[in-house]
Image (tube, rainbow, N blue to C red):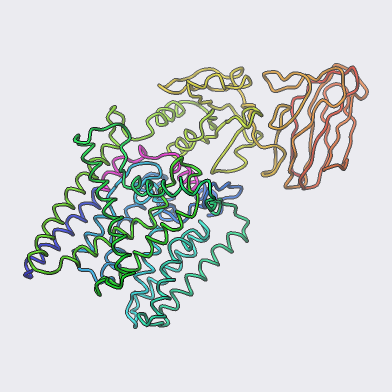
């Protein structure tokens, strides 16, 4: 190939890569908050809470999976502080992520032996929005909070570092510092996932190549290997030392009953990652059908490439030029082995296919690197491959990008994925309230909380037959404590779930708005909601006689007040109570008896009676102190013939 032809080839592929970056930036900017879904909503509200609290470790925060630090959050945080716009902040953060991807892929492919066109080809293949879904390729890698971008980047950066010259330059040492900081951060935020599934295969292969004399153990490479282990241990150790509880280590090994289905769905999950299954029935020869077949061909071709590469390695027939590419191939096969061994169908009935990103992205790099090398001779084949490869890449880019736009600008005329939530926010912003209680759907509260930072959105859900309780999956634990809701609030309920609205809300609320899917009410006083029992967090709390796991005898009215049975005896028993600080516990009740005592209030801890106080007649507030601890139980015993009205139990931390 002449120098001019080579220059034109490089220019074409780099122009395509630049166009893809610009496309992703412009589409996500135009879409803005319209593509925020429930998982992104959690991260948005978490980031805003970090800024408001002035710390990355927000006090009293409940983490659902990770600490959400090893994503675009840290890039978005200062921008949010300057602008107050979380959507703009994350968009700018994702622009930086896209540019980092281009730089990383260029460095990696060059050190694997590829040319400049291969660098651009790898960028094009990796940066395509193959699938638009909450846990799909585009959303996990380049959209909203890019939750998997840094996780996938780190192993690829480690490969590039290990392939640095024996006498590394200053930029290599600087990149090593960035890499080790990333290892520490992802271990601190997400535990050992990246180390186990991404860093381990690269380090194991590097050790094998060193043992076979194919890699020298320079101080720089030893720093890469030792630093990977050390930074990971420091991150995990710090998370444990700070008492942060995440659920990143809850995956289980397959047993005999789950292995077959999990293995089959693991392969299906790889195809799902590239959007190979349309959301609705489509003719094979329709535009949708042809696009799906193109995706299937891509995913199938990637798997074939992975198998071919493995067979060549095992047979000792891998071309010399491709031998450094063993690293991305090892990532793919190691990750596939892990996913075959683990049951990853806990949230998805088929497979949590986002886990394939750790192996699929290296496979895309491998294809972009390997195809030009394998077609380098003869010259005619190289020219034909360049033309066909360029044409095929254009077809793939146009198809994926057009369908990505169609996933946001939907066929029914709606824009984005959260039109109902945006309609809710529009109504709520006309009301004079601070709190919004969303009934029976947590995703709605999470999305609205990201779109509308001026209000606190919390979910009211059914708790195992114990009534409706405040619930959060990723937020402040005290948001589930009724004592913190002291002013009128909005109540949002899906129209199809109106029968689930508790009487204590409908009795004190009036309809103020309605959308196609939701009824919106406003309470005329502080809503009688709660979720937490006792005072496990915060400095105050309130329980009601019908709070979760409380038992009582008598009837409970629309104000959550218990009218006890006049037969007396034990009329109220609390749930197991946790007090994280020394606390004053106050029972509020009333009887028609004018004077004297009408019963006793007992505090038990396990089988030990800790305290017992008489309950006075009339309007009574019985207060007893309790030390911080767990396993407390409050019991109200009434005298025979006495009927009491028990309104609530209050908790107040003692300074």
Is residue 374 found left or right of 192 in the rendered image? Answer: left
Point 45% across, 77% down: residue: 223
Point 20% across, 52% down: residue: 19
The image quarter in which residue 101 lies: bottom left
- In the rendering, at what x and y percent does residue 283 appear? 23, 33
Q: How many marks?
A: 0
Quarter containing the N terminus: bottom left
Residue positioned most to the right: 596
> Vertical placement of 453 versus 431: above or below?
below
Q: Magenta-highlighted stretch: main secondary structure?
A: helix
> Vertical placement of 87 versus 388: above or below?
above
Point 62% across, 58% down: residue: 242
Write the start and end of the magenta stretch as one range.
24-48
Q: Is residue 115 visible?
A: yes
In the image, is residue 41 part of the stretch drawn in magenta? yes
Which one is nearer the viewer's eye here, 16 or 426? 16
In the image, is residue 79 part of the stretch drawn in magenta? no
- In the rendering, at what x and y percent does residue 373 appear? 20, 67
> Vertical placement of 584 versus 527: above or below?
below
Which one is nearer the viewer's eye here, 247 or 501? 247
Is residue 417 found left or right of 530 in the rendered image? Answer: left
- In the rendering, at what x and y percent does residue 361 appear? 33, 57
Which one is nearer the viewer's eye here, 425 or 382? 382
């Amino acid at each position: 190939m002449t120098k001019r032809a080579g220059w034109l080839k490089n220019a074409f592929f780099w122009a395509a890569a630049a166009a893809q970056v610009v496309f992703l930036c412009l589409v996500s900017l135009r879409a803005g908050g319209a593509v925020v879904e429930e998982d992104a909503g959690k991260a948005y509200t978490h980031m805003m809470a970090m800024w408001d609290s002035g710390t990355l470790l927000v006090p009293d925060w409940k983490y659902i999976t990770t600490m959400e630090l090893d994503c675009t959050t840290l890039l978005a945080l200062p921008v949010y502080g300057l602008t107050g716009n979380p959507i703009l902040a994350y968009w700018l953060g994702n622009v930086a992520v896209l540019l980092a991807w281009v730089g990383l892929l260029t460095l990696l492919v060059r050190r694997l032996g590829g040319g400049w066109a291969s660098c651009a080809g790898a960028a094009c293949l990796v940066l395509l929005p193959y699938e638009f879904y909450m846990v799909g390729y585009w959303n996990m890698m380049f959209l909203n909070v890019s939750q998997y971008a840094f996780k996938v980047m780190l192993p690829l950066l480690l490969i590039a570092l290990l392939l640095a010259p024996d006498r590394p330059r200053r930029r290599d040492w600087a990149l090593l510092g960035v890499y080790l900081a990333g290892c520490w951060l992802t271990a601190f935020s997400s535990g050992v996932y990246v180390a186990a599934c991404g860093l381990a295969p690269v380090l194991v292969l590097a050790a094998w190549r060193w043992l076979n004399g194919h890699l020298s153990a320079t101080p720089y490479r030893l720093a890469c290997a030792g630093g990977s282990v050390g930074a990971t241990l420091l991150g995990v150790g710090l998370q444990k030392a700070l008492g942060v509880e995440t659920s990143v280590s809850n995956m289980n090994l397959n047993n005999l009953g789950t292995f077959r289905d999990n293995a089959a769905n693991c392969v299906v999950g790889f195809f799902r990652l590239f959007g190979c299954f349309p959301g609705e029935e489509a003719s094979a020869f329709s535009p949708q059908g042809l696009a799906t077949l193109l995706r299937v061909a891509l995913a199938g071709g990637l798997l074939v490439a992975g198998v071919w590469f493995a067979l060549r390695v095992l047979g000792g027939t891998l071309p010399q030029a491709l031998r450094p590419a063993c690293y991305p191939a090892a990532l793919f096969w190691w990750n596939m082995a892990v996913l075959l061994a683990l049951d990853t169908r806990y949230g998805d009935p088929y497979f949590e296919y986002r886990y394939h990103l750790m192996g699929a992205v290296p496979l895309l790099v491998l294809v972009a690197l390997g195809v030009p090398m394998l077609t380098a001779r003869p010259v005619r084949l190289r020219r034909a491959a360049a033309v066909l490869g360029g044409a095929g890449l254009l077809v793939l880019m146009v198809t994926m990008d057009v369908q990505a736009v169609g996933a946001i600008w939907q066929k029914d005329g709606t824009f984005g994925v959260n039109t109902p939530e945006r309609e809710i926010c529009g109504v709520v912003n006309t009301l004079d309230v601070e709190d919004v209680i969303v009934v029976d759907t947590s995703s709605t509260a999470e999305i609205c909380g990201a779109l509308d930072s001026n209000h606190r959105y919390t979910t009211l859900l059914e708790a195992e037959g114990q009534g409706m309780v405040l619930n959060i999956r990723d937020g402040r634990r005290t948001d589930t404590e009724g004592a913190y809701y002291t002013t009128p609030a909005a109540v949002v309920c899906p129209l199809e779930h109106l029968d689930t609205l508790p009487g204590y809300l409908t009795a004190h609320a009036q309809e103020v708005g309605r959308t196609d899917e939701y009824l919106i009410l406003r309470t005329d006083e502080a809503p009688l909601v709660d979720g937490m029992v006792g005072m496990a967090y915060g400095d105050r709390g309130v329980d009601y006689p019908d709070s979760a796991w409380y038992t009582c005898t008598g009837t409970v009215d629309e104000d959550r007040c218990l009218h006890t049975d006049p037969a007396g005896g034990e009329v109220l028993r609390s749930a197991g109570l946790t007090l994280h600080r020394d606390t004053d516990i106050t029972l509020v009740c009333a009887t028609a008896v004018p004077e004297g005592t009408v019963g006793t209030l007992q505090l038990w801890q396990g089988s030990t009676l800790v305290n017992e106080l008489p309950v006075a007649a009339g309007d009574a507030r019985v207060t007893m102190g309790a030390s911080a601890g767990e396993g407390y139980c409050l019991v109200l015993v009434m005298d025979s013939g006495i009927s009491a009205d028990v309104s609530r139990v209050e908790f107040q931390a003692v300074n």
